[in-house]
Image (tube, rainbow, N blue to C red):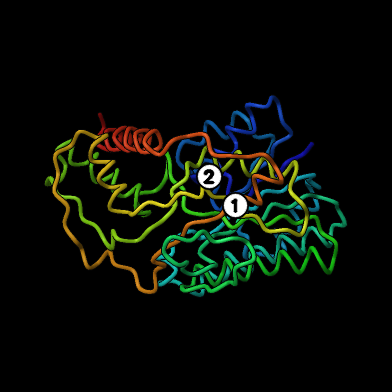
Amino acid sequence: MRTFVTGVAGFVGRHLVRALTVEGPLDLHGADHGALDAIPEPEELQAVLRSYRALDVTDGDAVAAAVKELRPDRIVHLAAQASGALSLEQPAATYRVNAMGALHLLEAVRAAGIEATVLLVGSADVYGSGSPGTKIAEQAPLDPRNPYALSKAAQDMLGELYASTYGLRVIRTRTFSHTGPGQSPRFAVAGFAHQLARIAEGHMPAEVRVGNVDLVREYGDARDVVRAYMALLDRGEPGEAYNVCTGHGYRLGELLERLIRVSGVRATVASDPARMRARDADHLVGDPEKLARRTGWSPAIPIDRTLLDLYRDARERVRREAGH
């Protein structure tokens, strides 16, 4: 079975490749925006991918050519501009990558006439903000609050359109916040881990700079998330949307406190106005019942294990950056 993963060199893409290869040899192909020799740590991908191509998903002709050549049985569309903060600075670019990129992929599959299962990886940010103490289910209305969320809502709606109108086997995810080893420090919890690692190595004062830490979010483990994606590829219902979530919310400040404990670093916490983000969701916790009922998936990695692995990875990265 031929599988094609866009965004394969990213944080989640690499975790997905590892999970897929555990199953045994695969006809696995990948694409990302940069040439293979220009991305960090390409050796892992070189070892397992049958082919890799630099692909700009905003180029519809290039996407169509890739799909026509590969004719995959399964496509996992991870390619995205994934930062809500960056989307506020670059709204048009974010929309081109996330919404138009998805449109180009869906149209490429339709034009090629293949019966591939397409997993469109979306975001729970499409829901806006939930009410404190509640869990958001898939029937909740979409209420995007920033350019990133809007681009993902458009992607989601395009997926439903191509499934219902053209009969494509499109499965949509609305994935809630997740973290783990390898995540960029521009994301909140990974950024906390990175700062603590730099403090531990003596590269910055013992003060963690934070934005709004009173937000309540899910933080699943990326390694659990990719298992959910694999389960949906096998057992998801085409045309449907599924929350990928744990159902457990955490105040961001609590996660920082846990990270400080697992790191063993003595540090104070200071508010940084530059890290505040406009129109952020105050409470975003999902209901995982539909996914569990359809696939049997449930999260397996406890939050403290996720945080410990995240910190250890950040510490190793900081050491490598310093040449140690």
- Looking at the image, residue 208 lies above or below residue 2: below
Is 217 above or below relative to 73? Answer: below
In the rendered view, does 90 fall on the left or right side of 32? left
Counting from the top left corner in percent of width and height, residue 271 is at 19, 61
- In the rendered view, tell whether residue 26 sits above or below residue 206: above
Percent position of residue 322, x then y: 24, 36
Q: Position of residue 235 (x, y in %)?
A: 75, 43
* Label 2 close to label 1 by CB (< 8 Å): yes
Q: In what element is the residue under mark 1?
A: loop
Residue beneath disc 1:
78
Residue most extreme to the front: 133
Look at mark 2 in the image and give the residue it sits on.
12
Residue at point 14% right, 39% down? 266
- Of 17 and 231, which appears nearest the observer? 231
The image quadrant where one finds the C terminus is top left
Q: What amino acid is at disc 2?
A: Val
Q: What residue type is labelled 1?
A: Leu
Q: Report whether 29 appears left or right of 42.
A: right
Question: Measuring 75% from the left and 45% from the top, which residue is drawn there?
Answer: 74
Toward the right, the furthest residue is 113
In the rendering, at what x and y percent does residue 323 appear?
26, 32
Quadrant of the rendered structure where residue 306 is? top left
